[in-house]
Image: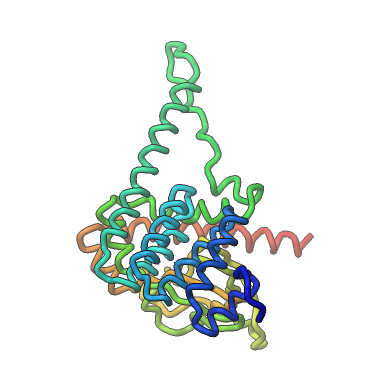
Amino acid sequence: MAKGKPRFENLDHYLANRDYGTALEAIAEEIKRRPENLNLLLRQAEVLALADEREKAIEVYRTLARHWAEQGFYARAIAVINKVLRLDPTRQEATRELASLISAQQESERTERAKLRRATAPPRTGRTAPAPPEAAGPGQVADAAGQAERERAASRFFAEFSAAALEELLSTTSVRSFARGDTIVREGESGASWFLIEEGEVDVQTTDPAGHDLVLARLGAGEFFGEVAVLTGRPRTATIVARGEVTVIEVSRQDLDHIAATHPEVRSVLQRFYEERAQATVAKVLARMRGSDA
């Protein structure tokens, strides 16, 4: 290969040859060229870890986690903090920082919503006026705003807890990756954990009476699966298959039970999210049936 300025397109070559210094130079140049591409920071942190620059890698990961959290992408932030803990399990202050940041953001948003309601409330007329409808939340505008808003909406699951409960929950998570076609959970098996999709898409499948696979739904970043078995103790109700490369955040039932012993709201929030999704699924099935009858 010709000598000269490192080029980002040769990154795989540098890494294959363990030339981490040159690889980092190439990434740094690409970050200058495309500062908006945050995946470059992920690559930078990964290479720093390979180069045994652990502290520098951790700082990049924490900076990226703060950014994702400030944008409302809590699942992405949690996945990044998990990388910090894999590099150094003693860095529990990283989960504490993220939990505090999420809690502070939610408190600020609640204050702003309260101000908005007061500012738009109708004048008193001597009798109680009906409460004005709240502004549309992320879940209501998800289809119009796209996948990013769907992810933000589902990520708010983590904003329902106190900072202490959230910190404990974050410290128990693990991140797993799957390739296209991998079965993540299988219908009928016992379930010992639930999952939040951090990146990628999965198909929710079952088997029809003829033995054929039937796709019930497609889930993307920020959406949950596996919570039914964890909440009820019943076997898995569907098979989940990766549509491509998928990264998920996993929480075990054992860890959830341990946290719920001191923070009961954790299980309550998961139950509420489960019920809301179950209602949405029933509505979709009914709508499909009405459409087929037309």
Q: Image point 50% across, 22% down: which residue?
A: 120
| Extreme-front residue of the structure | 3
- Please name whichever residue, 173 or 160, is drawn nearer the observer in this view of the structure: 173
**Residue 79 x/y as whole percent:** 43, 65
Q: Image point 44% across, 23% down: which residue?
A: 118
| Extreme-top residue of the structure | 126
Position of 102 relative to 44 (above/below): above
**Residue 169 x/y as whole percent:** 31, 62
Tell me the quarter of the picture where residue 239 sits.
bottom right
- Please name whichever residue, 278 or 41, is drawn nearer the observer in this view of the structure: 41
Q: Image point 58% across, 72% down: which residue?
A: 202
Q: Please, which colouring scheme is shown?
A: rainbow
Q: Image point 40% across, 79% down: which residue?
A: 191
Position of 223 relative to 17 (above/below): above
- Please name whichever residue, 36 or 147, is drawn nearer the observer in this view of the structure: 36
Residue 257 located left or right of residue 276: left
Q: Looking at the image, can residue 129 be seen?
A: yes
Q: Looking at the image, can residue 217 be seen?
A: no
Position of 1 relative to 92 (above/below): below
**Residue 218 x/y as whole percent:** 61, 68
**Residue 58 x/y as whole percent:** 36, 64
The quadrant of the rendering that contains the C terminus is bottom right
The quadrant of the rendering that contains the N terminus is bottom right
Tell me the quarter of the picture where residue 212 sits.
bottom right
